[in-house]
Each structure stands twice: as C-alpha cells, then as structure tokens.
Image (spheres, rainbow, N blue to C red):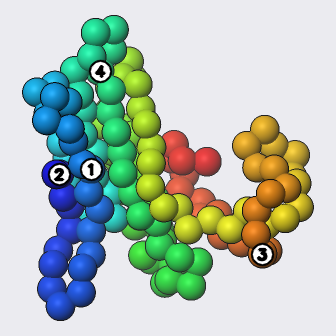
C-alpha cells in the first residue's frame, strides 16, 4: 500500500493499493499531500501513472481548494506526456439531475449540481 497523509487522532490521507505482481513494475511514487498521491508503473508500450486524490468539499476555505488544484496541476505537469494517466478518487462533485451539454455529465446524478470550479490556471479544467 502506498500512503500519503498524516495520522493523528483522525485519519487523513489517500492510498493506492498495489497487487504484489504490479508492485514489481512500480517505477516511482510521489506522496504530494494528504489529498494527492501518484504512482508510475512500467508497462510494455507506455508507462502508466495513477493519480489518487480526495478533493475538498465546496464548503472548505478557498485557499484549501486552490491548494488541492495546484497540487493536481503540479503532478500532471511533472508526469511525462507519453505516460498513460489514470486519475481516480473522490472529487466531491454533485452533478445534479439535469443534463448539461457535455459528453461526460448526464442526467443521472442526485440532488443539485455544485458549481465550485476554481480557476486553477492550469491543466485541470
């Protein structure tokens, strides 16, 4: 298990569970913060980078939200362009029940959509 975070009286952090056969292909990992970790695995055609994250909720301070997106931008900027990138985790998004003009978000969400979209000025848009 690759873990990034801190443990105090509460548990904070993100992790990537790696099967023992996949562990032999682990090239590197980067423990960015308690919200972001990445791991790169050697593969035949191209290396694979897995980014695991846990986004702050919309009610968190703006500084915490901006810091999360800066960390994600940094991880993606440092990942070689030829790698296959898989971004997984909890983005704390509420997509709502109304469809929007997108191939990604349909009408099958719950509750109302949250419109929190920080201007990262970077890769995550």
Q: Which mark is residue 2?
A: 2
Residue that mark 3 sits on: 111
**Disc 2 on helix, strand or loop?**
strand
Lower position in the chain sequence, tag 4 or tag 2: 2
Residue 46 in sight in this render: yes
Label 3 neighbour load within 10 Å: few <14, some 14-19, many 20+: few
Q: Is residue 114 left or right of residue 77?
A: right
Lower position in the chain sequence, tag 3 or tag 4: 4
Residue 98 image point, x, y percent: 89, 61
Q: Residue furthest top?
A: 45
Mark 4 against mark 1, which lies toward the viewer? 1
In the rendered image, the vertical position of residue 41 relative to residue 119, given as above or below: above
* Along the line of sight, the residue nearer the viewer: 98 or 56: 98
In the rendered image, the vertical position of residue 84 relative to residue 116, given as above or below: above
Q: Is residue 103 left or right of residue 43?
A: right
How far, Cα to Cα, is label 4 from label 1?
17 Å
Lower position in the chain sequence, tag 2 or tag 1: 2
How far, Cα to Cα, is label 2 from label 1?
5 Å
Residue that mark 4 sits on: 47
**Disc 3 on helix, strand or loop?**
loop
Q: How many marks?
A: 4
Lower position in the chain sequence, tag 4 or tag 1: 1
Lower position in the chain sequence, tag 3 or tag 1: 1
Is there a contact, CB below 8 Å, between mark 4 and mark 1? Answer: no
Residue 103 image point, x, y percent: 78, 38
**Disc 4 on helix, strand or loop?**
loop
Q: Which residue is at 27% across, 16% downward?
A: 43
Q: Which mark is residue 64?
A: none
Q: Residue furthest front?
A: 20
């Amino acid at each position: 298990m690759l873990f990034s975070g801190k443990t105090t009286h509460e548990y904070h952090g993100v992790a990537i569970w790696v099967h023992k056969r996949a562990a032999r292909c682990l090239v590197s990992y980067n423990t960015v913060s308690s919200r972001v970790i990445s791991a790169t695995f050697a593969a035949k055609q191209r290396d694979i980078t897995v980014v695991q994250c846990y986004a702050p909720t919309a009610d968190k301070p703006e500084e915490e939200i901006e810091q999360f997106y800066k960390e994600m931008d940094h991880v993606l900027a440092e990942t070689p362009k030829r790698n296959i990138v898989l971004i997984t985790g909890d983005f704390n998004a509420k997509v709502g029940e109304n469809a929007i003009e997108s191939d990604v978000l349909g009408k099958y969400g719950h509750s109302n959509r949250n419109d929190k979209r920080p201007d990262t000025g970077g890769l995550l848009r």
